[in-house]
Every structure is written in structure tokens, then in C-alpha cells.
Amino acid sequence: MSPIIRAVAADDVEDIAHLETICFPDPWSKASISRILETPSSAICVAEKEPQGILGYAITTSVSGEGELERIGVAPACRRTGVGRSLLRYALGQLVQAGVKVVWLEVRRSNESALRLYEREGFELVRVRKGYYPPREDALIMRKLLVPEPAG
């Protein structure tokens, strides 16, 4: 049975903060995640499956028709099972409903599985930020048009 993708609830913050420590070398704190919940321009969705609980999450922001995929975190045991793709598609759908026309993200050059996912989902490389991530790893800046640009 596939996980359920849903909007975050306040009692999910602890699980998301725990996944942050597993998924990222620079995890966001529980307090930071709680503040995101209170920010109208931000959204969090989670992938949940019983009896495991929260398997992953995605965090987005949107302002003036542009969005950013801030984070996608998936429990290591659930990677390469479609959880990340499901979260990404749900988050992009929410951004479209919010009137977002283009979404941006940045990803470590070494994160090959994330790069493959983003490319398969229609993101394109726009530029490189040299040495952005410690200790000196490049960030790849990618974007996806959610609404086609008018022919010019």
C-alpha cells in the first residue's frame, strides 16, 4: 500500500525534526520547522504509512507567483520507493493551486538520486553556485515552469 500524502499537522513537527537529523548534514531545528508552520507563504506536506508513521516530508515557499522547494527529506529505508516523487508531485500541485508559475530549488552536486528525480520531473539546470555547501561543494540551481511561458 502506498503512503498517504497530506498537509502537515502540528503534531508532525517532532517526526519531521527527527528526519531532518537523518537526512541532512545541516538539519533545521524543531523550532525552525514550527515557525514554518506559522508562515502563510510556506507549506509542508508529509508522506505517512501505518504502522511506520511519517516516511518523508516536503517544504515549499511561495511569493508573487514564484515558489521554492526548500526541502525534501525521505527516511533512508524508504528512498528509491517513490516516496520522494509522490511528495514532490503533491508539493508542486499545491504550488500550482497557490498561483505559482515557476518553482526553484538548489541541490548538492553530489546528490545524484535527487538530481535524477528533479530531472525526471521536468526541472532544468539554470546555474551553479560554486562552493556553496560546506566544505566547498557546488549547489545546482534548478527550475521548473509550472505554467508555460507565453510565446514571444
Image: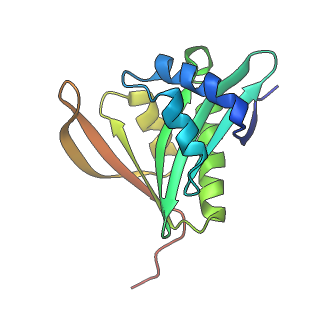
How far from the left and from the top, in percent, is residue 3? 76, 29
In this picture, residue 140 sits left or right of residue 12: left
Is residue 81 among the parts visible in the rendering?
no
Q: Residue at 63% x, 39% y: name it.
A: 87
> How are the residues colored?
rainbow
Q: Residue at 23% x, 27% y: name it.
A: 134
Q: Please tell me in which quadrant of the rendered image residue 94 appears.
A: bottom right
Q: Residue at 81% x, 20% y: name it.
A: 50
Kindly give the residue lying farthest to the bottom in the view shown. 152
Q: Please tell me in which quadrant of the rendered image residue 17 appears.
A: top right
User: Tag count in the figure?
Assistant: 0
Is residue 115 among the parts visible in the rendering?
yes
Q: Quadrant of the N terminus?
A: top right
Q: Nearer the viewer, residue 90 or 54?
A: 54
Q: Residue at 55% x, 57% y: name it.
A: 41
In this picture, residue 75 sits left or right of residue 53: left
How far from the left and from the top, in percent, is residue 79? 57, 22
How far from the left and from the top, in percent, is residue 114? 45, 33
How far from the left and from the top, in percent, is residue 80? 57, 24
Q: Please tell me in which quadrant of the rendered image residue 152 appears.
A: bottom left
